[in-house]
Structures are given as C-alpha cells and as structure tokens.
Amino acid sequence: MVELIGTFDLSLLAAIFAGLVMFGLIFYFWQSRSEAQARAEVRKRLDISSRGGRSRGNAPSAKQAAGTLATNIANRTNKYYSVNDPTQQRKMQMRLVRAGFPQKGALGYFLAARLGLGIALLLAALGIVVVFFPEKELTHKALIIMLGAAGGYFFPNFYINKRIKEREGENRRGFPDVMDLMVVSSEAGLTIEASIERIAQEIRRTYPILSEQLHVAAIEVRAGKSLDEALRAFGERVGLEEVQGFATMIQQSKELGTSVADALRVYSDEMRHQRMMAAEEKAYALPAKLSVPVTAFILPIVIGVAIIPTIVRLMTQ
C-alpha cells in the first residue's frame, strides 16, 4: 500500500484536488449566474424596472454584482439549513442577534463566510505545502492542510463567540443602572411601556446596546405585542438571566396584583447587590492571580539576592 502511494506524485494529487474544488465553485457560481439572468429576463418581460434612477441600458457595477452574488449564496445557504435543521437555524440566528447582527440574511452570510473561508485557507495551506514544504512527509502535509481548513472554518465561530461575550459583559454592567432608572420612572408615575422608551433614550450614550434593545422592545409593544412577550424577547436578544428574571417578575406582579414599583425596587436592590458581589469576587481573586507572577519573577530574584553572597563567600574561603 505504501509503495502504491509512493508511485503518485503529491503535486499531481494536489492539482487534481484543487481542480475538483475549482470545478465545483465554478459550477456553483455559473448556476447562480444563470438563475440571476433568468430572473432578469422575467423582470424585463413584466416591465419591472429598478427605482434607483438608473437607466436599463447601464450595466451594473462590479460592486453591485459582487453584492448580488453574495446575497444569492447567503439565501441558498440559509434555505438549505432552514429545510434540513430548523432548530439549529433558530439557535444560530439568536447567537448572531446577541453578537450584534440582527439582519435578516445574517445567518446566510455567516454560513457562507464560514464555508468560503474554510475553502480559501484549505487552498492556501495546500499551496504553501506544495511550494515551501515539498520534502515533508505526507502525514505532515496532510496535517498542515487540515489545520488550515479547520482554522478557516472555525474562525467565524470564534469571532461570534468573542462578540457575544463582550456584549453580554457590557449588558451585565449596565442592567443594574437600567433597573434603578426603572424604579425612578415607576415612582414618577410612568407606566412600564413609557419607562422603557424613556430609559432607552437616557442610556443611549452610556449603554448603546441596551438602549437599542430597549428601543426594539418599545417598538414591539407599540406594534401590538404584549409586554410580557416583548420583555421575554428582549431577554433572549440580550442573553442575560437577570433580564429573564425581570420579565418573570413583571408578569407575576401583574397576575398577583402587587405593586410593580415595590417589586422593581426589590429587584433593583438585588441587582446592585449582585454587582457588588461580582466586584468583591474579583477583588478577592486578585491575590491568587498575583501569586503566579510573584512566584515566577520576584521570588527567584529574592532567593538569588539572599543566597548568592553566601555562596560567593564560601567559595572565596
């Protein structure tokens, strides 16, 4: 088996693989272009022209053509996942919303970018192996190629997770202030709906993410959605358990007939207490974190200063 593999040239196998990949991409793009041309013919027959003030005889620019192609790829990918795995599609859409990409075609662009980046880095790793490491073993070459493809495929996930973590941290720092403003608004006589709109305007500069999501919740309430559903959707978009608890607290206060202002005041105190506990936890963890650099960098110097003179004195005697 090893002799049979050795009879084939690695560059020939790489060229064949690259040719197959390029053939698949060309076929995919050609099919997309054919469908776009067919849709264009239908628009011409129905006499549907664009409203951008551009004449029909002018050809679209390269930027517009690239945008149309990217949109087609995203729509195809989104349609494929929506048919085969709608549950996973819903989860991925919510992750993108929490990362700050609430657009309708964000999932399709994300999936297309993940696939395209994986193929691009696969081809780049293949070219690097063929050009710079022709004398390496076959297993090493295959490992480099696989690492390139895996890095390109998983890099968008890493970027999305990083953005989600950053946005959740900012939302967690700002939500206690939102609750304090909610208590002030409630005691001033405003309803929950009016308080949400007012707070969204007040925190626009300090906490823009929370302001945007509160504004969306206010629009949903004005559009006819109930307050409980709007707050639950707000909690899902923000991704914080505290917001989910806030929505549940508002719903229970309405069902039981208790004072919403009192419930908000208690919940606001709890949020401030949790923020103080988080700060104290970081302060208590600081000595343990400082022990590592102290042990690695300062302790050897202190030991050396204390022991080296004694060693030198003993050697001179």
Image (cartoon, rainbow, N blue to C red):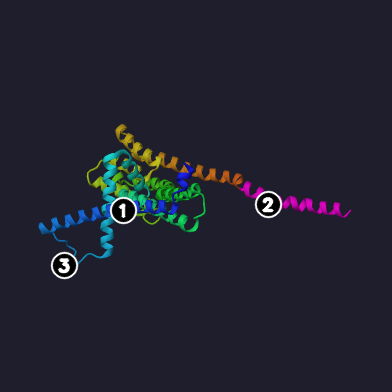
> Is the stretch drawn in magenta largely helix, strand or loop?
helix
The residue that disc 1 covers is 23
Q: Is residue 12 left or right of residue 227?
A: right
- Per the rendered image, the range of residues in magenta is 290-317
Can you give x and y, in whole percent of width and height, for residue 33 in the image? Answer: 23, 56
Q: Amino acid at mark 3?
A: Gly
Residue for point 46% across, 56% down: 130
Residue type of the residue flagged with mark 2: Ile
Residue with the mark numbered 3: 57
Expressed as whole percent of the image width and height from the top left, the position of residue 72 reads: 26, 53
Q: Are dots 2 and 1 in contact, CB under 8 Å?
A: no
Q: Is residue 150 left or right of residue 77?
A: right
Disc 1 is placed on an element classified as: helix
**Residue at mark 3 to residue at mark 1: CA–CA distance:** 32 Å
Q: How many marks?
A: 3
Nearest to the observer: residue 152 or residue 227:
152
